[in-house]
Image (cartoon, grey):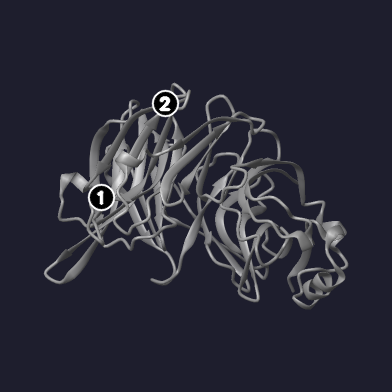
């Protein structure tokens, strides 16, 4: 039987009626105090005060600060802070570079370059028509916040591709890997590809690769292995490539409709791990070797959550960041699962029905510490008056 322990923030300020509702929803238990041993929020910093940007990514700068990226009012946006959360610059794509066309535009990911400038990747509609083509977007911003370059891209320059998204950018080899998806109509049928670009240290394209028959996914993820191979995950499909773009191995996990997240080890190792992206009654951690050979599974009764990020701690336990659904209501959540997936400890941010999700999380470099980012809205009945992005520093025990 799964052992469940939950803790919720700000309970001391909740009216009795909300507490009773929480009990009825089975999100509060007498063992809540014990669950505080798993997660301790040590500090919070409010960013983007009185704004409500959509967050897509959080990354760390070379000097230990952070870049948060996404969109504000449908315009690609990013903010950089120092290690303490003090804002250093704020960037929005200039309006002359952006045409609405009825389509949202976002930065989806960010990466620190060798000179501590920032590479941002994403997408935007290009054109005045109601449904313009969507192009990949690459922006380079220097350490002081000045935009050095801005590019929109079709896969290999081919304008027959109508839907093109750049989802992840990560340091790789002597530059960066940028991973996305691209689609086009051919003879009435949609062709879909995983789209990979290799950039040099200056952010210039070295080569591109289109991998066919990969289902597009907003959860497309990339991770570099200790051997400097690139591990890609889109929905339930895993691809391993070397630094020349040669596919070394490709594997399908689960069923076509399944979605997974990469489990990132805090201490790097050679095992590739995937975990279900959405909460299930039970959990399965799947392990693969350096060539994606099957290394077996860990199954347990402790279910996960809808996860945006997943990490493997040194003791082999898992930490998930995302949202838990309470009667179909998303609640920003952190979950720690024991190594055997038998015990689950849950931290739910309050208020339940408006807290949404933890959009991204990463280790700070300090032992057992993570930083998370999420949107908060005012709700006086819960003593929540803030509107903006909340950066929270969390100690995981």
Viewer-nearest residue: 238 or 48: 48
Image coordinates of residue 59 in percent, x first then y, are 52, 38
Q: Quadrant of residue 336?
A: bottom right
* Quadrant placement of the N terminus: bottom right
Image coordinates of residue 49 in percent, x first then y, are 62, 43
Viewer-nearest residue: 9 or 290: 9
Within 10 Å of disc 1 (Cα), the crowding (few <14, some 14-19, many 20+) is: many
Outermost residue, left side: 187
Q: Quadrant of residue 137?
A: top left
In this rendering, position of residue 255 left or right of residue 212: right
Marks 2 and 1 close (CB-CB < 8 Å): no
Distance from Cα at disc 2 to Cα at disc 1? 23 Å
Image coordinates of residue 382 in percent, x first then y, are 78, 60
Image coordinates of residue 41 in percent, x first then y, are 75, 46
Q: Residue at x 54, y 47 (%)?
A: 264
Name which of mark 2 and mark 1 comes first in the sequence: 1
Within 10 Å of disc 2 (Cα), the crowding (few <14, some 14-19, many 20+) is: few
Could you tell me if residue 291 is visible in this image?
A: no
Residue 217 drawn above or below residue 145 = below
Residue 375 drawn above or below residue 1 = above
Viewer-nearest residue: 303 or 169: 169
In this rendering, position of residue 374 left or right of residue 201: right
Q: Which mark is residue 126?
A: 1
Would you name the residue on which mark 2 appears? 146
Q: Quadrant of residue 300?
A: bottom right
Q: Which mark is residue 264?
A: none
Residue 350 drawn above or below residue 195 = below
Residue 200 drawn above or below residue 390 = above
SS category of the residue bearing label 1: loop
Viewer-nearest residue: 12 or 90: 90
Q: Residue at x 86, y 64 (%)?
A: 31
SS category of the residue bearing label 2: loop
């Amino acid at each position: 039987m799964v052992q469940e322990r939950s803790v919720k923030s700000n309970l001391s300020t909740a009216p009795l009626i909300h507490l009773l509702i929480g009990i009825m929803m089975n999100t509060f238990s007498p063992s809540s105090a014990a669950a505080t041993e798993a997660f301790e929020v040590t500090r919070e910093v409010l960013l983007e005060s009185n704004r409500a940007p959509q967050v897509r990514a959080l990354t760390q700068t070379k000097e230990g600060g952070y870049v948060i990226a996404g969109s504000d009012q449908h315009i690609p946006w990013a903010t950089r802070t120092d290690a303490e959360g003090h804002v250093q610059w704020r960037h929005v794509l200039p309006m002359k570079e952006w045409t609405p066309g009825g389509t949202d535009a976002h930065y989806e990911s960010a990466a620190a370059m060798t000179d501590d400038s920032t590479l941002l990747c994403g997408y935007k509609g290009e054109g005045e028509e109601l449904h313009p083509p969507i192009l990949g977007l690459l922006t380079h911003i220097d350490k002081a916040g000045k935009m050095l370059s801005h590019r929109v891209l079709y896969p290999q320059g081919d304008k027959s591709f109508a839907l093109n998204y750049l989802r992840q950018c990560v340091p790789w080899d002597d530059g960066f890997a940028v991973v996305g998806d691209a689609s086009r109509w051919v003879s009435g049928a949609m062709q879909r590809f995983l789209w990979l670009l290799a950039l040099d240290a200056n952010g210039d394209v070295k080569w591109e690769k289109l991998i066919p028959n990969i289902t597009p996914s907003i959860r497309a993820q990339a991770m570099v292995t200790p051997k400097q191979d690139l591990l890609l995950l889109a929905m339930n499909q895993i691809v391993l490539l070397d630094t020349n773009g040669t596919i070394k191995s490709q594997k399908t996990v689960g069923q076509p409709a399944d979605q997974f997240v990469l489990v990132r080890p805090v201490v790097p190792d050679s095992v590739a791990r995937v975990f279900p992206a959405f909460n299930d009654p039970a959990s399965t951690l799947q392990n693969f070797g350096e060539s994606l050979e099957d290394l077996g599974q860990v199954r347990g009764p402790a279910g996960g959550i809808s996860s945006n990020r997943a990490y493997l701690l040194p003791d082999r336990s898992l930490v998930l960041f995302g949202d838990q659904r309470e009667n179909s209501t998303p609640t920003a959540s952190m979950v720690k699962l024991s190594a055997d997936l038998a015990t689950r400890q849950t931290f739910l941010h309050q208020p339940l029905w408006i807290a949404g999700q933890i959009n991204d999380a990463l280790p700070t470099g300090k032992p057992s510490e993570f930083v998370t980012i999420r949107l908060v809205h005012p709700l006086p009945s819960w003593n929540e008056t803030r509107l903006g992005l909340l950066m929270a520093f969390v100690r995981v025990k």
